[in-house]
Image (cartoon, rainbow, N blue to C red):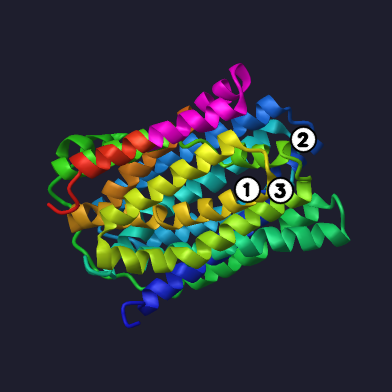
Amino acid sequence: MRYLTRTIWILSLISLFTDMASEMLYPVMPVYLKHIGFSVLLIGILEGVAEAVAGLSKGYFGKRSDYSGKRVPFVQLGYTLSALSKPLIVMSVLPLWVFWVRTLDRIGKGVRSGARDAILSGEATPETKGKIFGFHRSMDTLGAVLGPLCALCYLYFYPEDYQTLFLLAIIPGLLAVIASLFLKEKPAPPKTNIPEPAFFSFLNYWKESPVQYRKLIAGLLAFTLFNSSDVFLLLKAKDAGLNDTQVIGVYIFYNLVYALFAFPAGILADKLGLKKILIAGLGVFGLVYLGMGLTNNLYVITALFFLYGIYAAATEGISKAWISNISDKKDTATAIGTYNGFQSICTMIASALAGFLWYQFSPGVTFIVTALASTLVMIYFGFFVPEKQ
């Protein structure tokens, strides 16, 4: 597997360690915030603001990376900010402090994402994009398996000792920062003939981008508008009768399936075509949400979480590989960052819409509407979006 270069291994290990640190805290974050006095409404506002900041900053820093011709400094700074934010959150219970630290973590993700994906794209050829992005997603998601497992083990022996857990999360975070020091910059000329980018200047890329890019992103964003937070799937599992530990267990199971299948899905995409695998993944997603809307059987729901892992493996890395294939090499970070920026806004809308349908009608309506929307997006990709320019 010569296509898995030294740089790809380093980036993949960095992502594994960082996701491990983040996912150690993901299952306990809402519990900890409620423990220090946050209401459910305040938690929702906190997460919404943090994700919006992350999305917009991905677009800006992606543009900034392309403008400067540099990648590695953005990767190193982004992972450092995220690592430092983990222990800082327990330094004070003041809502303003918690907001600032959570936002710092998301800004870190925004700083690094476009530059990191541009490095991955630069290490691949059009024929190996699926493999490269798939392998990176596998390693990244493996961290999402190890992190919650570590958290569960620690809380089993030290129940409700959340503060120490937050401090321990800096260990894999620091390992990610150390690994980033081994990255080597490949010189690229900066863009000297254009003005320095302003914060929202990445939005201009939409008008400048190839038509195929706009068609692809339009489909992905339409799907995102109905692809609400995974929290709703976990709530469904909870309502079906799983206890808190079992819900975390199902979440770990989903991530394990995702980690195991992302790389093979990338290999398959390089052979059969990125478009075919993405459409297949959307089809699996539709089946999962239709099933969630029609059943409360615990065995069926567990099987649906298995399929949900297959869906993620067939879409997350594949979509970025496809974007990088149809965008100019000098604009890769901007192209992916712009998509991520719009995606974050659509994700916020999707979760609000899902919450509205859930409480105004029923959980079943929420899932069935999403399944129908994903079917329409599949038809759009099948008939209106060519894979190659």
- Label 1 to label 2: alpha-carbon separation: 31 Å
Q: Could you tell me if the residues under marks 2 and 3 are in contact, i.e. CB atoms within 8 Å?
A: no
The mark found on residue 247 in the picture is 3
Q: Which numbered mark, 2 or 3, is in the foreground of this view?
A: 3
Q: Using the rendered image of the protein, determine whether residue 193 is visible from the camera's viewpoint.
A: yes
Q: Where residue 156 sits in the image (x, y, percent)?
A: 84, 59
**Mark 2: which secondary structure?**
helix
Q: Is residue 356 magenta?
A: yes
Query: Within 10 angstroms of label 3, few (less than 14), some, or many (20 or more) residues?
Result: some
**Mark 3: which secondary structure?**
helix
- Label 2 to label 3: alpha-carbon separation: 18 Å
The mark found on residue 34 in the picture is 2
Amino acid type, mark 3: Val
Amino acid type, mark 1: Val
The residue under the point 27% across, 47% down is: 335
Which one is nearer the viewer's eye here, 370 or 209? 370
Res 324 → quadrant: bottom left
Side (left or right) of 132 relative to 52? left
| Highlighted magenta segment, given as a residue range | 351-374
The mark found on residue 300 in the picture is 1
Query: Main structural element of the magenta stretch: helix, strand or loop?
Result: helix
The residue under the point 22% across, 69% down is: 125
Dot 2 or dot 3: first in sequence order is 2
